[in-house]
Image (cartoon, rainbow, N blue to C red):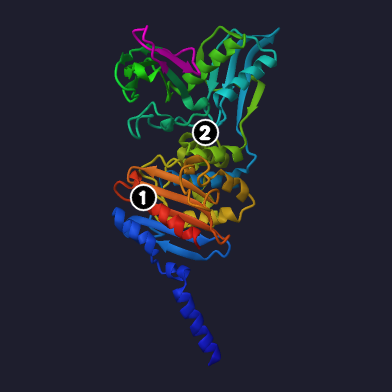
Amino acid sequence: MLKTLVALAALIAAAFHPLARARDSQLPPAVLRVMNKVGIPAKNLSIYVRDAGTNAVVLEVNANQPRSPASVIKVLTTYVALDSLGPGYTWKTRAYIDGRMSNGVLDGDLFVVGGGDPYLTAEHWWRFVQNLREQGLAKITGDFVIDNNYFAPAEGNRADFDDQPFRSYNVLPDALMVNFQTSRFTIIANDQRARPLILVNPLPTNLTIQNQVRLIGGKCYTSGVTFDTPDPIDNPNMIVVGGVLPATCGSYSIGRAIMTAPDYAYGTFHTLWTQSGGVIDGALRTKTLPAEAKLFHEHDSAPLAEVIRLVNKYSNNVMARHLMLTLGVEKYGPPATVESGRNAVRLWLAEHGITMPGLVLDNGSGLSRAERVTARGLGEMLDLAWHSPFMPEFAASLPLSATDGTLRNRFKSPGMQGRIRLKTGHLDNVSALAGFVNAASGKTYVVVIMVNHPGAQGGSGEAVHAELIRWVFGQ
């Protein structure tokens, strides 16, 4: 009798415990109030909250409903890469000589073979050039030849997603992607000139700029500046900078993705090569590396642990896409394809017992209107990551509340700063978060919330996020 009473008391206590109520898919009242205020019904969101210490699920709402995750999908891509490849994994960019070299003169071609480095920035590209010079190469009588066959050619073009081909987030993967194919255009108004001065950094030698910007009066605004490639097929290296810019703006800078990947790689190489005192007589070609070519220099990328930090902190799309392609090429061999990358992720999920009904993988970056995942599936993956030997590297890659990345201006309430690590995601009608919350109690919770609702990206989704995270933090 006593045991029965004790058990009954335990059940009653559990029923009134806030976490137990959450298990019954009852939204916390504060979260529900915000949802009602902003007009988001429960059917349009999914939530999964799990105690990382006990593995108890403390809240789940529509957790098995496939949702568009936007950039939150990057937590899956980056962790699968980290677990599969290891934090010290690097990509190789190699230079080969095809010809005879004597007294610093290569009588032949210089081949550069791309290895899919997702972070071959202008600084790293400069170091690549300097290393060639420091190894004694001074003159190339032949061509600069690119072999980018490690990745299959990307399908589509940069305008496909939102008709914004000059935005860096739309850059397509390439085995030799230099500086995200992005240069900074600085437009300097000068009252003594009919048109402003345009500076480009880095400046590809083969880039032609037509300056058609008109200076006007009035208050400063920069939305009037336009970029165009009038002949993208026959002359992709000519950029027309047009529109209007008020002279009161003085100097205005903006990054823009330009040219094709091979043209950009060659143009920036040529600029850096000649600046370093090198000479090249030939032009650009793309061709498969011949068997007789000899390895001359090998450049290592930043390690994977550093790369995933850049992907997640700043939500870099093309770097995430390179990660998925790398998973495919490492598992199934070159050339890397989007489908081989998807298969590698699906296989990893199956091997780790994570099921996601209705899973649709696209490119691994979240820049997709087709991608679908479940909150439970992402939550289980995050819980696995939390208990992994690579947890420190993965957790450190996520934006930190009120500190850095895409969370630098969020969750500033007392006590929250630096205790919340969440990847953010936004697309039209999508707002999402996924990661870890170190609650006031000292417990750590896995949290996934995805809102798929008209206008969710405009602030209403974040209002619901904020109340949910406040609730979790208080546990």
Instruction: Please tell me which residue lies in front, 47 or 39.
Output: 39
| Residue at 46% from the left image edge and 24% from the top image edge | 182
* Residue annotated with mark 1: 461
- Span of residues in magenta: 187-208
* Tag shown at residue 375: none
Furthest toward the bottom, the residue is 1
* Residue annotated with mark 2: 335
Point out the tag, 2 or 1, that comes first from the N-terminus. 2
**155 magenta-colored:** no
Q: Amino acid at mark 2?
A: Pro
The secondary structure that dominates the magenta segment is loop
Residue 423 against residue 316 in the figure, above or below: below
Using residue 128 as the reference point, say whether residue 76 is left or right of it: left
Task: From the top left corner, tell me how far across and down residue 84 is, in percent.
Answer: 59, 46
| Residue at 35% from the left image edge and 18% from the top image edge | 248
Instruction: Please tell me which residue lies in front, 118 or 324.
Output: 118
Q: CA distance from mark 2 to mark 1?
A: 39 Å
**188 magenta-colored:** yes
Task: From the top left corner, tell me how far across and down residue 371 is, in percent.
Answer: 39, 46
Task: From the top left corner, tell me how far across and down residue 25 is, in percent.
Answer: 40, 66
Residue 136 against residue 69 in the figure, above or below: above
Instruction: For label 2, count other residues whose C-alpha is less than 10 Å away and answer few (under 14), some (14-19) or many (20+).
Output: some
Q: Nearer the viewer, mark 2 or mark 1?
A: 1
Q: Amino acid at mark 1?
A: Gly
Q: Quadrant of residue 273?
A: top right
Using residue 284 as the reference point, say whether residue 62 is left or right of it: left
Report helix, strand or loop for mark 2. Answer: loop
Say if residue 324 shows up in the picture. no
| Residue at 42% from the left image edge and 58% from the top image edge | 47
